[in-house]
Image (spheres, rainbow, N blue to C red):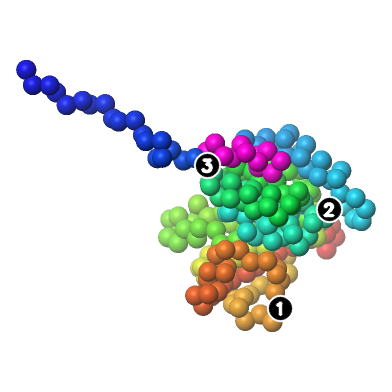
Amino acid sequence: MTDLPSMEKPLAKYEDINPYTARVYDHPDILVPHPTPAEVRRRLEKLRMASTGGPAPRVIVDLGCGSGNFLVGLAHRYPADIFIGFELRFKRLVRGAEKLEKQGSGNVILMRERAENFAGYFDPDSLDVVYVNFPDPWQKKKQWKKRLVGTPLLETLESLLRPGGVFRFKTDHSGYFLHVLSLTRNRKNMRPLSWSNHCQREASLLEPVRTEFEHLFRARGKQIFRLELEKRHPGD
């Protein structure tokens, strides 16, 4: 009798398993693999308590922080402020945590969480700056509902930003930029502070720290668009 071929699939080789799914637990002072609102509040309060003298630290959020180069640069430049990065991919989070530890920055919290869910971790009027840098443009019109920056995010920013707080957005996609710019026209509580359809031509940098994507796009001579919105003060 001829043996039938086995229908069982071979076990995955050890090297095929993503090692970063375990390594996210190696940086407990910086990286939160399973964040909860209570844990984030606890860490924020701890960082506020560690701040000595001067004004209260700003709370600055980077949605989709990647492997952390932008946050690392900001944390070094503004050591008195608190930075929170949202990222989903294990490897990028671990790389970011390693860079922050090497730099000695203790003012950053990295969270493994979708950027779309960030609103659940903060109180109203509690954030000073929110960044979204080069998100997926979802170019086809039927995909626009998947875009991170749209009406739902703008409504969330109106709630979470302090009066005078700002939202900073950069993209290399002109259609995405124009779409977001059009959405700001009827926002009663948000106003455009500045915008550019070609960052490379600006005489001065609004933000001296650049992301990996911005360095790449500038090297290729690609056009970069930016928009800065401010939450209005009551009575403005």
- Foreground of the two, 41 or 210: 210
- Residue 204 drawn at (x, y percent): 71, 78
Which of the two discs, 3 and 1, sits closer to the camera?
A: 3
Q: Which residue is mark 2?
A: 57
- Residue 100 drawn at (x, y percent): 68, 52
| Dot label at residue 14 | none
Q: Which residue is mark 1?
A: 204
When asked about the image quadrant of residue 25, the answer is top right
* Residue depicted at 53% across the width and 55% down the height: 147
Q: In 3D space, how far apart are the residues under numbered discs 2 and 3 (Cα atoms)? A: 32 Å
Can you see residue 148? yes
* Residue depicted at 55% across the width and 58% down the height: 135
Other residues around mark 2 within 10 Å, as few (<14) / some (14–19) / many (≥20): many
- Foreground of the two, 184 or 175: 175
- Residue 127 drawn at (x, y percent): 76, 51
- Foreground of the two, 29 or 103: 103
Question: Helix, strand, or loop for circle 1?
Answer: loop
Can you see residue 152? no
Q: Which residue is mark 3?
A: 20
Amino acid type, label 1: Ser
First in sequence: mark 2 vs mark 3: 3
- Residue 130 drawn at (x, y percent): 69, 56
Other residues around mark 1 within 10 Å, as few (<14) / some (14–19) / many (≥20): few
Question: Helix, strand, or loop for circle 2?
Answer: loop
Q: Is residue 115 left or right of residue 128?
A: left
Amino acid type, label 3: Tyr
Residue segment shown in magenta: 20-33
